[in-house]
Amino acid sequence: MTREEIRQILRMPEKDFRREVMPLARETYRKADNQLYGMSMLGYSNICRNQCLYCGMRAGQKIPRFRLPVEEIVGSARAAKASGFSRIFLISGEDPGYGYEHLLQVVEGIHALGLEISLACGEFSPSQYQELKAAGAGEYVIKYEMGQREVFNRLNPSTDFDKRMAAIEAVKASGLKLASGNIVDYPGQTEEMLIEDIELMVKLDISWAPIVPYMPAKGTPLAETGANGGPAKPGERLKILKEIAIMRLLMPEIRITAQQPGDDLREGMASEQGNLDALMAGGNILFCDLLPDARAGAFRVVDHRELKGVSHFRKMAEMSGMELSL
């Protein structure tokens, strides 16, 4: 697909996109796999040292903070396996107080249970990614968020673009599978920037595109000022569906996040409408949150992050004509 063809899809009226492109993306995935992957997910720490302007867990944000001990994380993984899951996604803020040795213990303990492990814990050194791989991790999620150096550095003042891309390359060099992607339609993003982000995912040869639309998090600088000084608006839902479809056509066999919002943002990421639309555009992953409700509400990268469980997976699989795999 050329850059001009990507641009044509991004500019396509919704009616034409749903009639012409979504069915093509859905059929592309049906031929490649057609499984809906239900993945267990555990946010084990919402403490973060970073000051990303868009994130609801940024340092200084007034939310209840928590940090789960090793034994509780491994116990949650054991319960996930007993429920039929074969993979767990461990995610945290960039928490300097957690202790890298504790993270290694978590990975070793879960690997011993026979579960596949995806991690999203921030930037580490090349040797630390290698140690995580040796301990049993299989995939590392480190998003570049926005693929333009100046924009990334402005919105992520606690790190910088070159450092993030070096970490991404270190993940690949370690032998871990790389999951990476962007935020769609955040304030100030242009069409050309979105196209560049799509091309970067292809260039990085990712295993999973954990892409989401911009969703304002209350109290964050970007939510309050947007691109023009006023309150920011959520990313356009049609744009995330178009990116999902484009990524499916470009990379037929990768995993793509289908946990997407619908028109009513109060339904969070568990919107049946949003999830089904994403599946029909080529998405194939939904998540089951292992945190209890009280803590899940505090793991607030975005507002209204609510998820649903296995019964929701089954319903989405039936409605989309996909085969459910945990």
Image: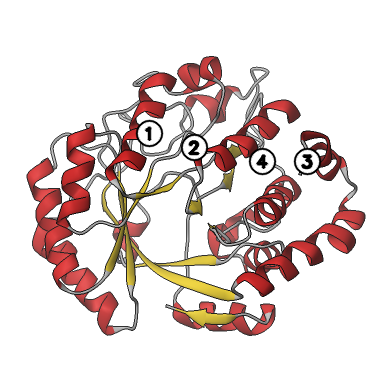
Instruction: Give whichever of discs 3 and 1 has the lower sequence position.
Output: 3
User: Dot 3: few (<14), some (14–19), or many (≥20) neighbours within 10 Å?
Assistant: some
State how the image is colored. secondary structure
Q: Quadrant of the N terminus?
A: top right
Side of 178 relative to 170 (left or right): right
- Callout in the foreground (2, 3): 3
Q: Secondary structure at mark 2?
A: loop
Q: Which mark is residue 6?
A: 3
CA separation in Å, label 3 and label 4: 19 Å
Q: Which is more N-terminal, label 2 or label 4?
A: 2
Query: Can you tell which mark lies on residue 235?
Result: 4
Q: Which mark is residue 218?
A: 2
Please provide percent x and percent y for residue 171. 33, 40
Q: Position of residue 105 (x, y in %)?
A: 9, 55
Q: Tag 3: residue type?
A: Ile
**Circle 3/circle 1 CB separation < 8 Å:** no
Relative to 128, 19 lies left or right: right
Q: Earlier in the sequence, mark 1 or mark 2?
A: 1
Give the number of the mark in front: 3 or 4.
Answer: 3
| Residue 217 appearing in the image | yes
Residue beneath the point at 52% across and 65% down:
285
Q: For the residues marked 1 and 4, what is the alpha-carbon distance in whole angstroms?
A: 28 Å
Q: What residue is rendered at 68% in x and 18% in y?
A: 228
**Residues at marks 2 and 3, CA–CA distance in whole angstroms:** 33 Å
- Amino acid type of the residue tagged 4 in the rendering: Gly
The residue labelled by disc 1 is 169
Pick the front one: 3 or 90: 3
Image location (x, y in percent) of residue 248: 66, 57
